[in-house]
């Protein structure tokens, strides 16, 4: 049947629309990634601060009578790096490449690759965004979370100074679409007052950027700390003149007049910082002054809070807990101040900080140790702390193990579309941990059932031409090689001799569909092992 010109035009429009829709599902529309910063600090300079941090940990171990665990195998550290920075296990393709590199430089090279990888910037941006704007969608029309995370990803990818990023979050003006940093302000927009909420902004600023729960003094003086109600109100007052309308975010007249708790009369509160007042500039808009004070190199609370959060992202657990209340923490650690001082001295260089943390002896320790003291050893960081993977890490790893190639920006758009929608669906069913990501919590029965029997998990291992299990069954030259490749693809290690013998025997004599099914069963077993769902 002949196809008319109108039909061709219509088909072209439909295809163009489909491509646009798929592209928008994979990432921000028309986002041009900035050129990554090529400058790298000298390795000897990094080794100096790493040595100081390691010495601080050794003193702690000696004081507690702990002998640190042995160094973890390179492959385990490799897996940790990938999970920490891009939120997924490495692909089989990446593992093979890592295996071929010189042992003395390959971990450093992998860290370089990850810091230059857009997947890492996207993953870290989402992690930071949860502390800055939460996980909810925010007020309709006035908040663009996706736009905000994309902007944050661009900044991290370019290694923009962390202090400059936070300064923009607090002080930037303009429309939330054109100036994405202002979404930090607009997410608190109150429909009743038609204004951003100064108290929510003050609380978020204190917790996310200073590691202080100043909002515990919101209604009355803090019962355990030195904070007074006026300390919190003084910080909130910096946002009292902030407006958000369809012309954008700006500062005008102060409308923050909270009620006196005794007389219930409106009180005129002047902007005031809770400590280190000498660092507060005397000129500028209230938010600009506050931003300059927060990120001032002399404000150690800012550097400590940033270091503690990055440490938690890289290792899975804060160096000092709780992560948003460092001044009230029962335990401190000398390594925190060493890292914070180095972070401030090097212009709040986020990539450098990640390099330092990943290069420490503590990050590279094995997670295995004496079972009788394992919990105490982990608390003292004498062994690498085992932590459950976040839902996004489990989901991304589930999709990655199904493909022998890396699911990065070079992968076909269809694979990335399937991964994006599949990960979101899996996380929704698995359960999002929300903003408070570093609380220790146990897994649930529904989570285990989702991995065992869920549709998304089953589709990632069922025999099919594109999944890893089928490709390994077809291409592996021998049974033991097939078992080894499966272990590498799923849990990033080679099997022990006993494991290899056991599963090779299960594959012996099989071929065709039967062999594919047995490899599928092996993949299912590995995915449902504790080793897959934990960082170790």
Image: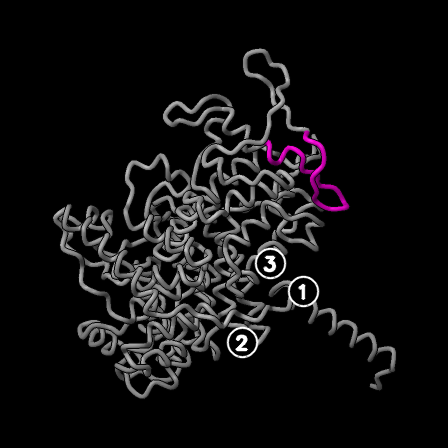
Pointer 1 or 2: first along the chain? 1
Quarter placement of the C terminus: bottom left
Quadrant position of residue 329: top left
Q: Secondary structure at mark 3?
A: helix
Position in image of residue 410 (x %, y %)? 54, 77
Task: Give the mark nearest the N terminus, 1 or 3.
Answer: 1
Q: Which type of secondary structure does the marked residue at label 1 adopt?
A: loop
Please give the residue where the numbered disc 3 appears in the rendered image. 151
* Residue 500 belongs to the span the image colors magenta: no
Q: Taking the image as drawn, is residue 392 in sight?
A: no
Residue segment shown in magenta: 237-254
Q: Which mark is residue 458?
A: none
Of residue 210 and residue 395, the one placed in the foreground of this image is 210
Q: Nearer the viewer, residue 213 or 289?
A: 289
Q: Residues within 10 Å of mark 3 (few under 14, many from 20)?
A: many
423 vs 287, left or right, is left
The x, y position of residue 358, in whole percent, is 34, 62
As drawn, the label of residue 29 is 1
Percent from the top left, x then y, of residue 395?
45, 60
The residues bearing labels 1 and 3 have C-alpha atoms spaced at a distance of 12 Å
**Residue at x 43% of width, y 77% of height:** 404
Whether residues under marks 2 and 3 lie with C-beta atoms below 8 angstroms apart, the answer is no
Question: Which residue is disc 2 drawn over?
Answer: 411
Instruction: Judge from the rendering whether residue 492 lies leftward or rightward of residue 437; answer left or right.
Output: left
Task: From the top left corner, tell me how far across and down residue 57 is, in percent.
Answer: 23, 53
């Amino acid at each position: 049947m002949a196809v008319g010109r109108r039909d061709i035009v219509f088909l072209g429009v439909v295809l163009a629309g489909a491509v646009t829709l798929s592209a928008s599902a994979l990432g921000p529309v028309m986002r041009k990634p900035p050129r990554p910063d090529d400058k790298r600090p000298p390795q000897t300079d990094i080794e100096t601060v790493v040595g100081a941090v390691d010495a601080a940990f050794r003193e702690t171990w000696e004081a507690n009578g702990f002998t640190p665990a042995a160094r973890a195998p390179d492959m385990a550290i490799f897996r940790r790096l990938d999970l920490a920075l891009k939120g997924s296990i490495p692909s089989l393709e990446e593992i093979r490449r890592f295996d071929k590199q010189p042992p003395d430089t390959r971990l450093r090279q992998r860290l370089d690759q990850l810091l230059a990888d857009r997947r890492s910037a996207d993953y870290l941006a989402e992690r930071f965004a949860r502390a800055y704007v939460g996980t909810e969608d925010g007020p309709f029309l006035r908040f663009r979370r996706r736009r905000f995370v994309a902007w944050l990803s661009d900044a991290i990818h370019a290694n923009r100074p962390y202090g400059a990023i936070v300064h923009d979050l607090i002080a930037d003006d303009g429309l939330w679409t054109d100036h994405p940093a202002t979404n930090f302000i607009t997410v608190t927009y109150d429909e009743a007052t038609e204004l951003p909420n100064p108290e929510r902004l003050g609380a978020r600023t204190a917790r996310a950027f200073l590691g202080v729960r100043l909002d515990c003094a919101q209604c009355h003086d803090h019962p355990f700390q030195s904070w007074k109600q006026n300390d919190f109100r003084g910080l909130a007052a910096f946002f009292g003149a902030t407006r958000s309308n369809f012309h954008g975010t700006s500062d005008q007249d102060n409308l923050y007049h909270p009620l006196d708790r005794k007389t219930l009369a409106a009180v005129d509160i002047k902007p005031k910082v809770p400590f280190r007042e000498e660092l507060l500039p005397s000129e500028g808009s209230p938010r600009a002054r506050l931003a300059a004070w927060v990120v001032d190199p002399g404000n150690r609370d800012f550097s400590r809070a940033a270091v503690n959060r990055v440490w938690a992202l890289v290792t899975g657990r804060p160096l000092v807990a709780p992560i948003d209340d460092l001044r009230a923490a029962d335990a401190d650690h000398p390594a925190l101040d060493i890292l914070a001082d180095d972070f401030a001295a090097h212009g709040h260089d986020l990539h450098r900080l990640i390099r330092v943390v990943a290069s420490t002896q503590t990050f590279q320790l094995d997670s295995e140790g004496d079972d009788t003291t394992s919990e105490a050893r982990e608390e003292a960081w004498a062994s690498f702390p085992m932590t459950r993977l976040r839902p996004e890490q489990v989901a991304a790893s589930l999709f990655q193990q199904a493909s022998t190639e890396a699911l990065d920006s070079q992968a076909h758009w269809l694979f990335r579309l399937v991964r994006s929608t599949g990960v979101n669906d899996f996380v929704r069913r698995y359960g999002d941990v929300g903003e408070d990501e570093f609380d220790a919590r146990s897994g649930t029965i529904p989570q285990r059932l989702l991995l065992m029997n869920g549709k998304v998990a089953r589709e990632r291992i069922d025999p099919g031409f594109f999944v890893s299990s089928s490709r390994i069954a077809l291409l592996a030259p021998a049974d033991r090689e097939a078992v080894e490749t499966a272990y590498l693809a799923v849990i990033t290690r080679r099997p022990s001799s006993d494991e290899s013998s056991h599963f090779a025997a299960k594959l012996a004599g099989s071929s065709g569909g039967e062999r594919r099914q047995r490899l599928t069963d092996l993949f299912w077993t590995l995915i449902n092992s504790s080793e897959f769902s934990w960082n170790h």
